Amino acid sequence: MHLDSSQQLFDRAKELIPGGVSSPVRAISPFPFYTSRAAGPYLWDADGNQFIDYCLAYGPMILGHRHPAIIQAAREQMEKGWLYGTPSLLEVEAAARISRLYPSMEMLRFVSSGTEATMAAIRVARGFSGRDKIIKIEGGFHGAHDSVLIKAGSGAATLGTPDSGGVPADTAKNTLQVPYNDLAALEAVLAAYPEQIAALIMEPVLGNIGPVLPEKGYLEGVRRITKEQDVLLIFDEVITGFRLALGGAQELYGIKPDLTTLGKIIGGGFPIGVFGGRRDILEQVSPRGGVYQAGTFNGSPVPLACGMATLDIMEKERVLEKLEASGKEMRRALQDILKDLDLPYSVVGIASMFKVFFGMEPHNYVQALRCDKAGYLDFFWRMMRSGVFLTPSQFETDFISAAHGSDVIQTTLEAFASCLKS
Ligand SMILES: *Cc1c(COP(=O)(O)O)cnc(C)c1O
């Protein structure tokens, strides 16, 4: 496999862009490949290599790359203009449609990224409750802002810098951590800080430390305890939304959070974020209430049009049912491969999410960190040489798109078998 052009691009990029990349998860060791185009389940790099893509831009591309219906939706919206600075027809329609799928989101607002969505959700939780502290789950990722950059999974965990420089100690002290799948730890923190905690923010299924699944009764317990203690529950469904079900993890597990954040899939591959929840809480948001939130690109028409076109296809073509079947096929076959090779690794996932952990199935962040990171990276490059682009970190989830047919999955499994063996 030749990567000469990517290497040259990296040499230039690292002089211009910190680490040569625009986001830390893209910093594959020793250097990343630079993509020139994408279609369906494939990416092509600057040297003309073709890869089957299981990273899928870390989640948004659930229909695969350059789906014709999304090209058409973007084109039609472009013909009508792409930024108005006024309210638009589209945002009212889109808000109604999302609120129907997520009944817990009685009101919502569109922003431009998942980061902005969680930042706003946390601010409104603080404004509503009059409390400063929040709890997050160790290894949970909620974007790159001060309150949540603490033991934040994926990029941060791979690079071994779970805390970020530049976060004031006064901010960090308001973010408490509890392990996932541990109700006793949650109860202990709530007891230690009575009436000081505004909210618990969590990914219902951890997506940024691999996929780590909730044990039976865990999410129900979280909902019961937060309600009893009068602490708001924020489900960050930026990954799980429109993926575990159209109505997200909250539909699948039957849990009603107070606030929800969405992003990724619902922009059709364009930048978006959404935060919403209980009417009495969202009425605190400006200009209705006193909690400020604003953005030039909020409710941007092209992402909304492409998000709605994505939902149209997902509903019409029963995409989630098909992805459920593909995910099952992939996980079952991977488990068989591990068994045949007698490897002490694990396959974890749900719906269209999967991961081979180089270690035992983790139930929280600390357990995930015990996996063989270096072994995974070596395996990652073997898969690349076989034409398969998995997420480059042991701590990122692999995704399957609607464009990954069974022939593509079969090719992938053959690569898995030979690379795991070698
Ligand atoms: C990706 C992600 C975010 C951040 O979204 P951006 O659009 O990258 O800002 C927040 N929360 C979760 C769970 C995510 O996976």
Image (cartoon, helix red, strand yellow):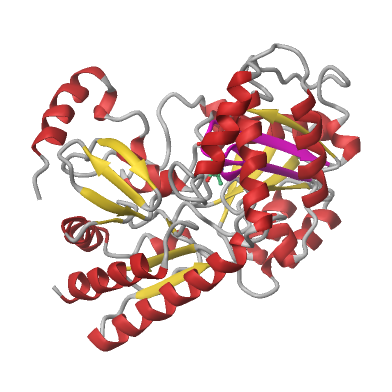
Q: In which image quadrant can residue 344 be found?
A: bottom left
The single residue placed furthest to the top in the displayed view is 85
In percent of the image, x 64 and y 23: which residue is there?
300
Q: In which image quadrant can residue 296 be found?
A: top right
Quadrant in the picture for the C terminus: bottom left
109 shown above or below 142? above
Residue 337 belongs to the span the image colors magenta: no
Q: Is residue 299 left or right of residue 150?
A: right
Frontmost residue, 332 versus 404 = 404
Residue 410 point in image, percent of width and height? 33, 72
In percent of the image, x 32 and y 65: which residue is there?
371
What's the magenta region?
259-277
Frontmost residue, 212 versus 237 = 237
Frontmost residue, 210 versus 105 = 105
The single residue placed furthest to the right in the displayed view is 280
Q: In which image quadrant can residue 304 be found?
A: top right
Residue 274 belongs to the span the image colors magenta: yes
Residue 142 seen in this snapshot: no
Residue 157 seen in this snapshot: yes
175 shown above or below 291? below
